[in-house]
Amino acid sequence: MPFRLLIPVGLLCALLPLHHGAPGPDGTAPDPAHYRERVKSMFYHAYDSYLENAFPYDELRPLTCDGHDTWGSFSLTLIDALDTLLILGNVSEFQRVVEVLQDNVDFDIDVNASVFETNIRVVGGLLSAHLLSKKAGVEVEAGWPCSGPLLRMAEEAARKLLPAFQTPTGMPYGTVNLLHGVNPGETPVTCTAGIGTFIVEFATLSSLTGDPVFEDVARVALTRLWESRSDIGLVGNHIDVLTGKWVAQDAGIGAGVDSYFEYLVKGAILLQDKNLMAMFLEYNKAIRNYTRFDDWYLWVQMYKGTVSMPVFQSLEAYWPGLQSLIGDIDNAMRTFLNYYTVWKQFGGLPEFYNIPQGYTVEKREGYPLRPELIESAMYLYRATGDPTLLELGRDAVESIEKISKVECGFATIKDLRDHKLDNRMESFFLAETVKYLYLLFDPTNFIHNNGSSFDAVITPYGECILGAGGYIFNTEAHPIDPAALHCCRRLKEEQWEVEDLMREFYSLKRNRSGFQKKTVSSGPWEPSAGPGTFSSPENQERAREKKSVKQKIPLLSCPSQPFTSKLALLGQVFLDST
C-alpha cells in the first residue's frame, strides 16, 4: 500500500496557495524599500556587534557579548560578511576589511578544521571577494583577476585541504589539520555533502590560478559518489571514504546530502558541463519517485525506497530554489508553500518537523537563523514576481527581529515553541540570511544584472568581460562571476584546440586507410557504468586508451554494502529509531 501523509486539517487549509497581491497582516503588501532598509539595519546591528565584541574570533556570542572560535580561528564572520558589505553598497568598509584580512588571517596554524566548512566559508568567501574587488574600488594588481592577494589567500587555504582527498576512493576526509594534514586517527566516515561540495570553489580556483589539481580532486569526489549510488538511484547520508561503503543509508535532500545535489546543478551552470547536469537529472527522477509525497520530501532507505523518517528538515528548504534553477517552477512553488506554512506556524523553521503530526521533533525544535527558505524565496521571486515570496521576506524580518534580536546582535533560537535563545550567532547569518533577504527586496542590485552592463578587463591572456550577471552562489551565498573562469585560461584553451585538430587529422587519416569512422552522439550524456560497480585505475587507463574522444570526467566508482545505521546529521549517526 503506498505511503500517504496524514496532515492536520488546519495545516491542510494553510497549504492552499495564497492569492497574488495578498495583503500582509496590516492589510498592505510588503514595501520592498521599507524592508530593504530594515534588513540593512539588521546587518549592521549584527556586524557592528561582532566587530566590537568578538573580532578576531570566528563568531559572536550575542548573549554574553564576546566571541569564540568555531571553525578554525579565521576571523570567520569577517570573511563571510565581506561580499555582503558590497551588496549593501558599503565599499569603504569592504576595502578596510580586505586590508584587515591580509594582515591578520594565517592558515599555517595547528588547528583541526572542517574541510567542508573551510571550503564553503573561507575559500568561497575569499574567491568571491577577490572577484568583486575591482567593483568595490580596491586597487587591484596587474594581472587581476588572474592574480591578487585574496586569490592567493584562497589558494593557500584550499591547499591546506588537499591532503584530505588522498584516500583510496578520492573522497575526502571530513577534517584536516591545517599544519600537519590528516590526523592518523581521523574517522573515515564523511557525509555526502562533505564529499560533493567542492566543484564550484575548486573549479573557480583552478581556472584563475591555472593549477588543475583543485578541479581534478573535486571531480573525482563527485564521480565516486555518482558511482556509489544504489540500484534505485539514491545516495545515503554518510560513507566510509576508505572503503566506499555506506555507513548511514537514509536518502533524502536534507542535512548531510543537500549541497551535493546543489553543486551538481550549480557546477553544471558554472562550467557549462552537461555531464554534471545529467547526473542531477537522474538523481531528480529517483528523488521524485521515492522521496516525494504530496510536495513534501521524506527520508527513505537508499536501497529499498521505504520511508524511514517522515520529517521535514529546515536545511531542505533550499530545494525549491534549486528547482527554479532547472526551470521546474510549478513544483518549486508548491513545495515552497508547504515550507512557508511551517514558518508561519512557528515564526521560523524548526530543524526537524514531523509532517504527519504537524509539529516539531523532540530535541530538534531550534532555528539557528538559517537562510534556506529565504534563499528559495529570492530565486523564485526572480523567476515569478509572485508577491507571496515578498511576504515570506517580510515575515522573516519581523520574526527574526522580534524573537532573536538582543543587545549584541542576533541570537540563535534554541526552541521555537517558547522562543528561548542560545548564545551563538553563526557566521552564515551575515553571509546568507541577511544577504538573501536584502536581494529579495532589492531588484536592481548589481547581483541581478541581466547583462545590460559589464566591465571589459585586460588580462595577460587577453580581454575578458566581467560583471555581466549570472552570478553563481556557492552554498554559503558567496557569488562567483562565471565569466571570470574564462579570463585566465586562454593558453590552455588554445592547447585543447590544437589537440582537437590533431585528433581530427588522425581520425581522417584512419578513415582514408579503410578504418570505419567512429561517431560521437550529440544527445544527452548517459552514465557508462551501473550503480555500485567498481572500476580499477588499471581498467580505467585501458578504457581511456581505447577511446578516440577525450573523456574529461573519469567515471570512478565505489562498492556499496548494506548497513543498518539510521540517519546521520551533522556528523552524528543516530542509531535508534527516533
Image: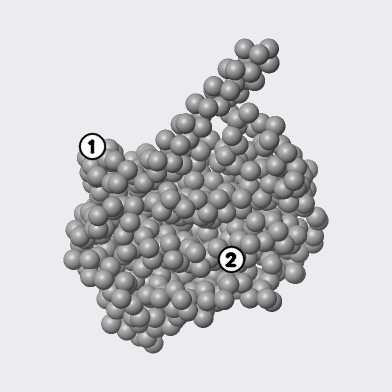
Q: Residues within 10 Å of mark 1 (few under 14, many from 20)?
A: few
- In percent of width and height, residue 389 lies at 37, 48
Q: Residue at x 46, y 76 (%)?
A: 108
As rendered, which of 331 and 246 lies closer to the eye? Answer: 246
- In percent of width and height, residue 218 lies at 55, 53
Q: Residue at x 44, y 74 (%)?
A: 107
Evaluate whether residue 495 shows in this view: yes
The quadrant in which residue 188 appears is: bottom right
**Callout 1–callout 2 Cβ contact below 8 Å:** no
- Residue indicated by mark 2: 163
Q: Amino acid at mark 2?
A: Pro
**Looking at the rendering, in which quadrant would you find the N terminus?**
top right
Q: Residues within 10 Å of mark 2 (few under 14, many from 20)?
A: some
Q: Please tell me the numbered disc located at residue 343.
A: none
As rendered, which of 296 and 21 lies closer to the eye? Answer: 296
Q: Amino acid at mark 1?
A: Ser
- In percent of width and height, residue 289 lies at 67, 40
Foreground disc of the pair 1, 2: 2
Asked if residue 79 is positioned above or below residue 320 in the image, the reply reads: below
The quadrant in which residue 468 appears is: top left
The quadrant in which residue 562 appears is: bottom right
As rendered, which of 117 and 349 lies closer to the eye? Answer: 117
Q: CA distance from mark 1 to mark 2?
A: 43 Å
Q: Please tell me the numbered disc located at residue 452.
A: 1
Q: Residue at x 51, y 81 (%)?
A: 110
- In percent of width and height, residue 521 lies at 60, 23
Q: Is residue 37 left or right of residue 332?
A: left
Q: Secondary structure at mark 1?
A: loop
